[in-house]
Amino acid sequence: MELISKRFADTVVLFPQGRVDHATAEQFKAALAPHLAAGATGGGRLVIDMTGVEYISSVGLRVLMLASKQAKAQGCTLAVCGLQPVVREIFEISRFNLVLPVFPTLREALAALSTEALTAFGAA
Amino acid sequence: MLVRFWGTRGSIPVAMTSAEVKRKLVTALVAAAGRGLDTPGKARAFVEWELDFSVSHTFGGNSSCVQIDTGGPDYVLCDLGSGARVLGNNVLATGGPSGHRFHVFMSHLHWDHIMGFPFFMPAYLPGNHVRIYGCHDALEEAFRRQNAAPSFPVDFSRMGARIEFIRLEPERDYDIAGLRVRAKRQHHGGDSYGYRLEHDGKVVVYSTDSEHKQDDPEEVKAFVEFFREADLVIFDAQYSLADAVSVKEDWGHSSNVVGVEMCQLARAQRLCLYHHEPIFDDERIATLLAETRRLEEITRGDHRVEVQAAYDGLEITL
């Protein structure tokens, strides 16, 4: 799975697509790894915009949990946003909405994480 | 085949508090206002058909014990948690004091799964026969140690029934009490074992105290095969998925989300949420059930899995 990424000031936004399930979770994990590693040195912020994700299974959610733990250990912030209705329900039923910062839109995520990133997003 | 649940609570038995009873009564009385429930029959019908389950019933508080009734002369059980006390008393009340034979498949030897045995009255009565099967080396030791000082006043040696311990090997088929039985090792502290029980074309999988490592494809595949096209999967859903993969990782339990996914992959007919979290009240378990049914619905492909939550007293006919 390739992750499109965009940088807004001190924040990197990733855009996964499709289904994150048993077939794709390892690819998702591998695609996240360099961004998490970069965050370790940059002390930055990472937002995963899930607008393009139609389904996420338990193994995909576990990848998010591991990424969040790694980010936290590195002093970074990781948030997700843009959940489609089905994915939002999966987050709520699995209680992932209680353990990860979840925002309705990318704009709201950036507003919560970084004024500079929000300004850069508005200017883009 | 009939499956009866005598104990469904995880980790430790619980009892409803007076505050919970009061809350149920208040809810029921408000719902009944103006309904003219002036006879026991009308009131009973109202309770049975119009109140939510979490108001009119309780999921119950006994720890693990499930009966598999094939219609044969012997009793077949999974685990001897505190629910076994109720079952034992029921057997004596309905079938007399002796002449009973029990076959018990033990998932593991943690306290909540064996604690019913010192109160399992048929074991004290001569003329009864209890055969306890399991895959752990310490199978017999765990039961003897529990029924001994300083843990219990009546020593194991004073149990009057004939009691046998039979070691099983996982991944091997056995024919016991009319059932084809196969055990599978599961992730849990000190290991636990699930059982796939088949009789007359029907399949029940008893899989409690089992943590599923979903990032291991081989393990997922093995459990999907173990659950394959089961008519009923009794599944440890004690934790939320978020807890199971974070603060409670390696605590040895699973979640409703993984239960749905595994049953979908295995094309099982029915998922029964089991080993309920002891801090959950009836309302919380009812919510968990509703959410799990919704999850099954929004993630369903071409196969529907019926979702239920176990409660003490539940009977499922297959």
Image (cartoon, coloured by chain):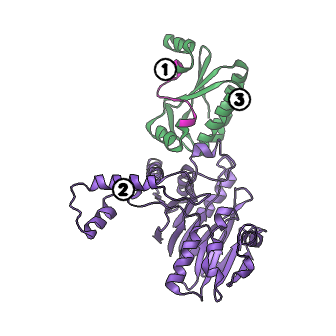
Chain colours: A green, B purple
Please tell me if label 1 and label 3 are on a single chain: yes
Mark 2 or mark 3: which is in front?
Answer: 2
Is disc 1 in contact with disc 2, using a CB cutoff of under 8 Å?
no
Three-letter amino acid code at the position of disc 3: Ala
Residue at image x 67%, y 69%?
B106
Question: Toward which corner of the image does residue B199 lie, by quadrant?
Answer: bottom right
Q: Is residue B275 left or right of residue B161?
A: left
Mark 1 or mark 2: which is in front?
Answer: 2
Q: Chain of mark 2?
A: B
Mark 1 or mark 3: which is in front?
Answer: 3
Q: Is residue B297 left or right of residue B102?
A: left
Three-letter amino acid code at the position of disc 1: Arg
Q: Position of residue A64 (x, y in %)?
A: 61, 36
Q: Chain of mark 1?
A: A
**Residue behind mark 2:** B25
Three-letter amino acid code at the position of disc 2: Leu
**Residue behind mark 3:** A73
Q: Position of residue A9 (x, y in %)?
A: 60, 13
Residue at image x 65%, y 82%?
B124
Residue at image x 62%, y 41%?
A62
Is disc 2 in contact with disc 3, using a CB cutoff of under 8 Å?
no
Q: Is residue B19 above or below residue A75?
A: below
Q: Nearer the viewer, residue A62 or B240?
A: B240
Report, in whole angstroms, how far the alpha carbon at label 1 lies from the one at label 3: 25 Å
Specify start and end residues of the magenta stretch as a single range: A98-111
**Residue behind mark 1:** A107
Q: Is residue B118 above or below residue B239?
A: below
Q: Residues within 10 Å of mark 1 (few under 14, many from 20)?
A: some
